[in-house]
Amino acid sequence: MNRGTTLLVLLAVALGTAGCEAIATIFEAGVWVGVIVAVLILAAIVGLVRMVGGGRRR
């Protein structure tokens, strides 16, 4: 391979790797957002059940 082709291949690999890293970061952030939303929904459901049930029973 000549020098131009080698540089072109190296550039393509570098850009592809950077793109994959960006996608991985986005998905990682999405997982944490999903966990937080699930916890908030669960807390809201528990709070709603406590309000409807009247809290603790004696």
Image (tube, helix red, strand yellow):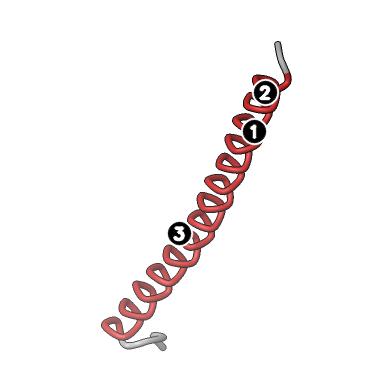
Q: Amino acid at mark 2?
A: Gly
In the rendered image, the quadrant that contains the N terminus is: top right
The image quadrant of residue 50 is bottom left
Of the pair 12 and 30, the residue shown nearer to us: 12
Position of 12 with respect to 49 (left or right) is right
Q: Is residue 42 above or below residue 49?
A: above
Percent of width and height locating residue 15: 60, 38
Q: Residues within 10 Å of mark 2 (few under 14, many from 20)?
A: few
Secondary structure found at label 3: helix
Percent of width and height locating residue 37: 42, 66
Sequence-first disc among 1 and 2: 2
Q: Which residue was labeled with disc 3? A: 34
In the rendered image, the quadrant that contains the C terminus is: bottom left
Q: Amino acid at mark 1?
A: Leu
Of the pair 36 and 17, the residue shown nearer to us: 17
Q: Are marks 1 and 2 in contact (CB under 8 Å)?
A: no
What residue appears at the point 39 percent right and 85 percent down from the top-left corner? 57
Percent of width and height locating residue 39: 47, 67
| Image disc number at residue 4 | 2
Secondary structure found at label 1: helix
What residue appears at the point 58 percent right and 35 percent down from the top-left corner? 16
Q: How many marks?
A: 3
What whole-number distance in Å separates the C-alpha atoms at marks 1 and 2? 11 Å
Q: Residues within 10 Å of mark 1 (few under 14, many from 20)?
A: few
- Residue farthest top in this picture: 1
The residue mark sitting in front, 1 or 2, is 2
What whole-number distance in Å separates the C-alpha atoms at marks 3 and 2? 45 Å
Position of 45 with respect to 18 (left or right) is left
Of the pair 27 and 45, the residue shown nearer to us: 27
Q: Which residue was labeled with disc 1? A: 11
- Residue farthest right in this picture: 3
What whole-number distance in Å separates the C-alpha atoms at marks 3 and 1? 35 Å
